[in-house]
Amino acid sequence: MTPPLATVPLILTLTIDGQEVGAREGQTIFEVAKENNIPIPALCNLEGLPNLGACRLCVVEVKGARRLLPACATNVSEGMEVSTTNEKLQKYRKMVLELLFAERNHTCSVCVSNGRCELQGQAQAQGMDHVHVPYLFPKQLVDASHPKFVADHNRCILCQRCVRVCDEIEGAHTWDVMGRGINSKVITDMFEPWGLSESCTHCGKCVQVCPTGALFEKGKSVAEMVKKRQFLPYLNTMRKYHE
Amino acid sequence: MTLEELLALAKAEQEKKAKNAKSINVCVAAGCLSSRSDAVKTALSKELRAKGLEKTCQVKGVGCLGLCSMGPLAVTEPNGKFYQNLNEADAAEVVASLDTEPPARIKCDGEVAFFKRQKKIVLENSGMIDAEKIEEYIGTRGYEGLLRSITESNPQSVIEKITKSGLRGRGGGGYPTGLKWSTVAKANGSKKYVICNADEGDPGAFMDRSVLEGDPHRIIEGMAIAAYAVGASHGYIYVRAEYPLAVKRLKLAIKQAESKGLLGKNIGRTQFSFDIDIRLGAGAFVCGEETALIASIEGKRGQPTPRPPYPAEKGLWDCPTLINNVETFANISTIIRNGAEWFASIGTEKSKGTKVFALAGRVANTGLVEVPMGITLREIIFDIGGGIPDGKKFKAVQTGGPSGGCIPEQFLDMPVDYDSLAKVGSIMGSGGMIIMDETSCMVDVAKYFMEFCMTESCGKCVPCRVGTTQMHAILEKITTGVATPKDLELLEELCVFVRDMSLCGLGITSPNPVLSTLKYFKNEYTDHIEHKKCTAGVCHMKNPQGVLA
């Protein structure tokens, strides 16, 4: 028996950086690029979590499009011509990273994630050697009330991975965002100390997906925090299997 | 109610009006109400009763009359005499002068350019009808367009009519309305929604509020016609909670329309059903952005999501959704009634119809005006607006709120339409128009709008969240006289970066006030930076020339 027509995804071809690639309808540029080993930098995007399109690091140029588009949130289409890197994109990506470094207090040398941090890694990969916007030095809190984990808001880049993994995968929705603009902040429950949260299941998924040292396991010292994300591909495979 | 019943009711209403010939229409929109026009209205009714005139002359609370700076305002029918600056004690004089001329003290000249140069479509009933009575709206041929559309026309020809009229979205973007409607109509999905965006948030803008307060049924009718055209059965009006009067009148209007069978199940005794719910905004400017607005209606945090997919394809609860602004919907019923050709005859080649503007700032007549597209800025500011008060000199006009730009004097004779405004680095926007004279410092103005964008940024994407903060910090440095030429370079770099990289319209357009002032008033920036001097005398320099320099 053949399934109804609508459920058969169309096969498309497009070019990414001059390379012709095939894709299924409904895939994002980011996914297709990854399948073809074309690296696109990203911070908020993580395979297995729903797209957000917030960090803007994955912006690409699509021929004919009026604006730069986030690769993680843009679906491929037939004949699309994507370029993932050029001078302008490079410059803009560096600026995104500089703004992030200037936004809060990122001191790599004392960070549990030093050497394994995605923000640090992207800065190295993009060749960001210094920050030429003024540092904002905001006063941020450290929440160490949880028995197993610590939230250090000085290192948070508001990628909302914790929010998404807690809501979509764990189903607890302990994390959310409070406030607006530069005063935005991830919080647990109704802005209560994490340790007092009644919804938190102590699963630690938020800690494992956090790209920086903002969320980490207690007892870890400088450069000791290794994030374990094996559960994500496993869950993804299981989810696809059930579909 | 069927079309025949509606027409009969309209006729009865018109006859009643002709019989009860005289009326005093007192503005009870928020502007005049804040200067106690409700007390004036009560005093007038009392005075009429005392003189035994209540049978021949009635007092009506009506929508905005426009000249808000002179409120409370009133106008008499049928002879059209305007009164201004009324208070309770003036009631006797107003009633006494009903058949003669108003006393000079409270007379407002209705023959001046402010009233004569306007062309009213959206505001045609504002100041004429009582917003709280559906019969009065029906008396002005209200709901006729809706019932004619659903009984005598099909969705396709309704869309065709709107397309032909050349109407473009009045929320600011200027997207062709007919095209938007046909996209939603063609989208797959058995359930579709119509949303009215009444989350008016630009500083100084109150066009939508005035329409909602003065003529709520016009919006309901426009939405119902749109719903019929695109195949939707449910609608939402997303209105900001700071507009309590508009909310109250909308609620009442919805109830009245439902009881008359003009909204709800089987409208006009046909198969077409459409109902409307009201959702209140919680004070976030970004919720005027369509994807954030949808998230807010869904009960989520009001944050934008990347487009595409556009709401027309995947909007509210993933269903195809039509979102139009209040003013766009307000044009619909008149277009349906008077025809696309009539509407297309007004305005310019690419911008049809009229536009409502809220005049504010350094202009003699502040208030609400509706003008045909293509009118020049000079006509709006100097003829209708009465020019700059106190013998001061015009400097710039800001259109489009925090997303728009400042237009200098050399463009005053430019026609006001979407494309001309975009060409000079501003936008039409929703209709805020702030006029500035030589006492305004353009860097300070740019800082004000940047501060607005910074505090209203939702915080989701990095360029807008951190970029606006950094830009504001630089502007703060410039206006306090501690900036260096390097800061200006960084400011320009950040402007382009935030414009190109932000997720939604708020961030994309947030550098516009800076970019346009940099383009036309660069000398003011350099005065602040190099000479530590603010020519307008607005900014307080921390480091005046000669001291510590």
Image (tube, coloured by chain):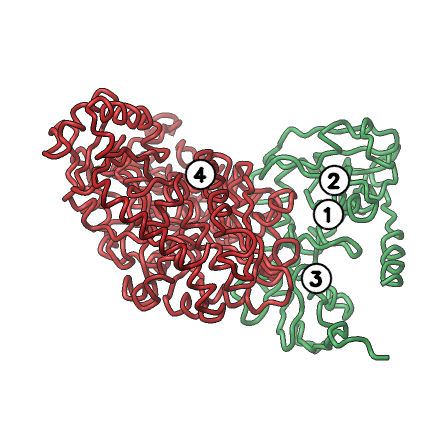
Near-viewer residue (B301 or B353): B353
- Do the residues indicated by labels 2 and 3 lie within the same chain of the protein? yes
Residue designated by label 3: A40
Mark 2 and mark 3: Cα distance apart in space: 24 Å
Q: SS at mark 4?
A: helix
Q: Are marks 1 and 2 in contact (CB under 8 Å)?
A: yes
Q: Which mark is residue B119?
A: none
Amino acid type indicated by mark 2:
Cys
**Chain letter behind tag 2:** A
> Which of the two discs, 1 and 2, labels the residue nearer the N terminus?
2
> Which of the two discs, 1 and 3, labels the residue nearer the N terminus?
3
Q: Are marks 2 and 3 in contact (CB under 8 Å)?
A: no
Residue designated by label 1: A120
Mark 1 is surrounded, within 10 Å at the Cα level, by few (under 14), some (14 to 19) or many (20 or more) other residues, namely many
> Which of the two discs, 2 and 3, labels the residue nearer the N terminus?
3
Residue designated by label 4: B249
**Residue B457 position in % (x across, y down):** 55, 42
Near-viewer residue (A167 or B143): B143
Q: Are marks 4 and 1 in contact (CB under 8 Å)?
A: no
**Chain letter behind tag 4:** B
Outermost residue to the top: B89
Q: Which mark is residue A108?
A: 2
